[in-house]
Amino acid sequence: MTMQAEFQTVIRAIDEEARGVKSFSLERVDGADFPHWTPGAHIDIALGEGLNRQYSLCGDPEDHRRLRFAVLREEQSRGGSSMLHDTVGVGDTLPVLSLRNNFPLVDADLYLMIAGGIGITPILAMVRELEARGKDWLLLYGGRSRASMAFLEELGTFGDKVVVCPQDESGLLDIAGFLGTDQVRTVAYCCGPEALITAVEAHCSDWPEDSLQIERFHPREQEAAAGGDTGFEVELRKSGKVVTVAPDVSIAEALEDVGVVIPRSCNEGTCGTCITKVVEGIPDHRDSFLRPKKRAENKRIMVCCSRSLTPRIVLDV
């Protein structure tokens, strides 16, 4: 889906942050300030027709003139990381479609942060903010090797609040030892590869759901629907329209065919852009964004990937 650019940017700097990791600093072409953002935010960037990607911001929210994000060169790139690493250069322009924050800092007394690999990008901005606020926090940061772990020098300024554990030196992260048991007014944050997030979710399975905040870069594997997908109807409560969604079409695509556009970006159910209120019906949740409690409420649906378990689902659109 083509999205109108919110603003055009120019790449002012590209830096090697670690083996296979580059950071990109952007300024607006028109010289204006960027909108205010908070730690945990990401930008949606248009890299080409049908190639929209989301990258967590790792710069300083108080620097209104520049945005910085970092990208890992994926071994099996779907086009985004390879283009940024191999094609673009300083002086090239990039359309930024939006700035969003679906991974914000919540209020707590103690923050236990876990980052794996490129998952350090949103966490870096968070720990800077927590330090500036005088909050108590600790960070456990893992990666394959020190050479592959970005921002180690900057993180080193925080002293023993940051525990660096390269896998080739320390083995797998000691998640249980770091997180311990659930404590009042303590929240854990995790961003990184799926294996790490799954392990952290398992450890925190008996914690209050809001005590664990996670962000995924890639969708979880979903079980295939028994008997395959079937069609269903979507009723739009505000307009009264009823749209048929064919088995091989997403809700978002079916709505766009009749001129109803719900903003979307990743098309995988990870970024949270297309989240939509459900008025009636039961969603068939296939996203990697909603937590179990929110899924069970069936009050929200990600229309880029999820479907309906009922013949008709009514959306607040």
Image (tube, helix red, strand yellow):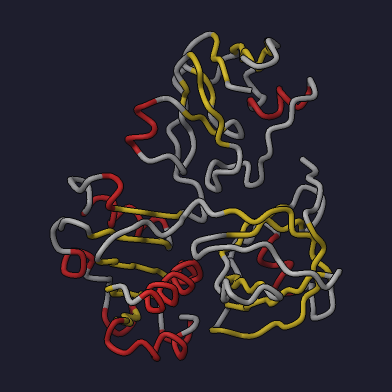
Q: Which quadrant would the C terminus be assigned to in this image? A: top right
Q: Outermost residue toward the front?
A: 133
Residue 50 percent across, percent down from the top left: 77, 47
Residue 67 sits above or below residue 38 on the image: below
Q: Is 172 in front, or is 270?
A: 270
Tell me where residue 135 appears, x and y as whole percent. 31, 73
Looking at the figure, which quarter contains the N terminus?
A: top right
Tally of numbered tags: 0
Q: Which x, y percent locates residue 157?
A: 40, 91
Relative to 28, 207 lies left or right: left
Q: Identify which residue is drawn at 20% across, 48% down.
A: 207
Relative side of 176 to 296, left or right: left
Q: Is residue 270 above or below residue 180?
A: above
Taking the spot 20% from the left edge, 69% from the top edge, the residue there is 178
In terms of depth relative to the viewer, which is nearer, 194 or 119? 119
Q: Which residue occupies 71% across, 28% down?
A: 253
Residue 304: which quarter of the image?
top right
- For residue 171, side relative to residue 105 (left or right): left
Is the residue 236 above or below the residue 209 in the image? above
**Percent from the top left, x then y, of residue 293?**
32, 35
The residue sitting at 46% across, 43% down in the picture is 288
